[in-house]
Image: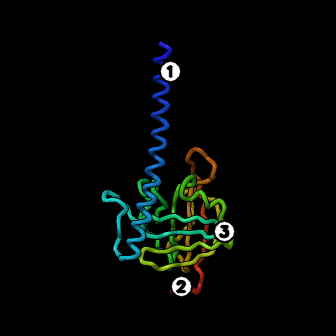
Amino acid sequence: MRRLVAALFALAGLALVGNGLWIHAKALLAQVLLERAFATTVATGQVTRPWPWADTWPVARLTVPRLGASVIVLAGSSGQALAFGPGHVERTPDAGERGVAVYAAHRDTHFAFLRDVRPGDVIVVTRGDGRVFRYHADAATVVRFDATGIDPLASGYALALSTCWPFDAVAPGPLRYLLHATLEMDAVH
């Protein structure tokens, strides 16, 4: 009986480890497919889905050179999109356009690097049309999810990166960390 119980525990442990490895393998494969889809979008000018059944597609690449951070930004901010990368929040302008472009992602995955961004850091956004825009991080704020104060139609050219706060929390909460950045003026068209 002891051997049977031990064997069942060993099988359960292997199943859990296998499931964890499978999740990480899927995440790595998704990043490869997102990179390819974004490269194809930039090269052809045609929206390219990362896999046939995807309900989102790459719209930009966001990099913070000082940190070596780079992520592919997806269309929309649904839970399905955010599972694979940052999402471009609906009804906000594209990066480089007048107003505030807003990207959101999870604090423990794709936007974990935000905790290390400092005022003055350069944030580079390459859109799917190949245009490149350089922003400078201005400041960060912590606000309630329903009181961000972001006006996507504000004058000027800005970028807001949003994630849950605090970074090391294990449960969801009502607070959001917002990193504000301003477009370099010579990059405005």
Residue 21 point in image, percent of width and height? 48, 43
On residue 26, the disc is: none
Question: Neighbour class for label 1 at 10 Å: few (<14), some, many (≥20)?
Answer: few
Give the image location of residue 69, x and y in percent: 58, 64
Q: Residue at x 65, y 59 (%)?
A: 115
Question: Number of marks in the image?
Answer: 3
Q: Is residue 174 above or below residue 43?
A: above
Instruction: Tell me how far mark 2 sits from mark 3, CA to CA.
Output: 21 Å
In space, the residues marked 2 and 1 are separated at their CA atoms by 65 Å
Secondary structure beneath dot 3 equals strand
Q: Residue furthest right?
A: 119
Residue visible at 41% across and 75% down in the picture: 42
- Give SS at disc 1: helix
| Labels 2, 1: front one | 1
Where on the picture, by quarter, is residue 57?
A: bottom left
The residue indicated by pointer 3 is 139
Residue underneath mark 1: 6
Amino acid type of the residue that numbered disc 3 sits on in the rendered structure: Ala
Judging depth in this view, the residue of 171 and 148 nearest the camera is: 171
Query: Of callouts 2 and 3, which one flags the residue occurring earlier in the amino acid sequence?
Result: 3
Q: Which residue is mark 2?
A: 188
Which comes sooner in the sequence, label 2 or label 1?
Answer: 1
Q: Position of residue 121 (x, y in %)?
A: 66, 71
Q: Count residues near mark 2 (Cα–Cα under 10 Å), then give few for <14, some for 14-19, many for 20+.
A: few
Q: Are marks 1 and 3 in contact (CB under 8 Å)?
A: no
Asked whether 32 or 86 is in front, the reply is: 32
For label 3, the crowd category at 10 Å Cα-Cα, with few meaning under 14, some 14 to 19 and many 20 or more, is some
Q: Is residue 181 left or right of residue 45?
A: right
